[in-house]
Image (cartoon, grey):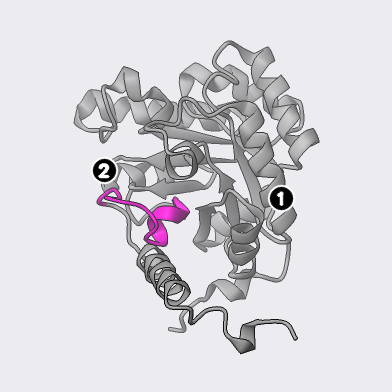
Amino acid sequence: MSTVTASAHREHRVTVRSLAQRKSRGEPFTMLTAYDFSFARIFDAAGIDLLLVGDSVGNVVQGVETTLPVTLDELIYHTRMVVRGARRSLVVADMPFGSYQVGPEDAVRSAIRFVKEAGAQAVKLEGGSLVAESIERIVRAQVPVMGHVGLTPQSVNAMGGYRVQGRGDEGRAQVIEDARAVQEAGAFAVVLEGIPADLGREITAELQIPTIGIGAGPACDGQVLVMHDMLGLGDSPPSFVKQYAQLGELASDAAKAFAEEVVNRKFPDAMHSYR
């Protein structure tokens, strides 16, 4: 059996419709977070199917402990940069805490801003049954919505920390109920985060919409990672993360080499000076 490469799916712009077709054909797809033009362009050219402008920007770019302080204006700014770098990838913007919790009207207004001001092709909301009405209203406004159930980082205070969800009969039933609610509300896909692998498999088999796993096992229709975790740019990544590079070490080595050459007057040399 031949190995499928990401380049095999680079020809056409990714859409919510093409993702549904990928699920029906049993073809996995990929999503990474991105927060600026440069990495968006790199990931897009590499064949990544979706780029999520995550509220994780608070953790990995702003240096805050949770995603809660991130504002709508900040994410619109980052989404605008990512859209400029994405020619093929579908760009999904995270709805930050406070932009949809008040009610459906606020949710629709926030989603429309992402489309009009930043060029996002979809938005993502955390939560299941509690945000179903907001998802439905946003979809009615012609903005595609990605759901997010299981471990929802914006609920960190209510959950008492970042804890695996869906364990035990009650917890399992709640995640399944939330996933169903998201689908019934009209979401085109749902992120499953921090749940047992067998639960990820069960939900993926039941839902008609694609599932995207992050710490939810290998059976999901797609997989997503935070780019800083994937590239080795952060400290102590979650146990479900696989680091595909160690860019943090490379950057540190490069900075040390630069500093040493400057101190010893080896840089700039004649080759790197104008004449």
User: How far from the left and from the top, in percent, is residue 155?
Assistant: 39, 23
Task: Say if 130 sits above or below 211 in the image.
Answer: above
The residue closer to the viewer here, 153 or 270, is 270
Please report the bounds of the magenta region as a residue range: 224-239
Based on the picture, tell me whether residue 51 belongs to the magenta stretch: no
The answer to which image quadrant residue 200 occupies is top left
Marked residue nearer the N-terminal end (1 or 2): 1
Image check: 135 left or right of 221? right
Give the residue number, with chain letter if any, for mark 2: 196
Image quarter hosting the C terminus: bottom right
Q: In the shown orientation, is residue 249 left or right of residue 95?
A: left
**Amino acid on which the number 2 mark rests in the picture:** Pro
- 230 in the magenta segment: yes
Does 13 appear above or below 189?
below
Residue 177, image x, y percentages: 40, 26
On residue 83, the disc is 1
Give, as a three-letter code, the residue at label 1: Val
Outermost right residue: 116
Residue at image position (47%, 41%) is: 191
Q: Residue at x 66, y 82 (%)?
A: 273
Is most of the magenta stretch helix, strand or loop?
Answer: loop
Q: Quadrant of the N terminus?
A: bottom left
Label 1: how many Cα within 10 Å (few below 14, some 14–19, many 20+): many
Measured as percent of width and height from the top left, residue 193 is found at 38, 40
Residue 48, x across and y down, in percent: 57, 62
Instruction: Report the front residue among 238 and 177.
Output: 238
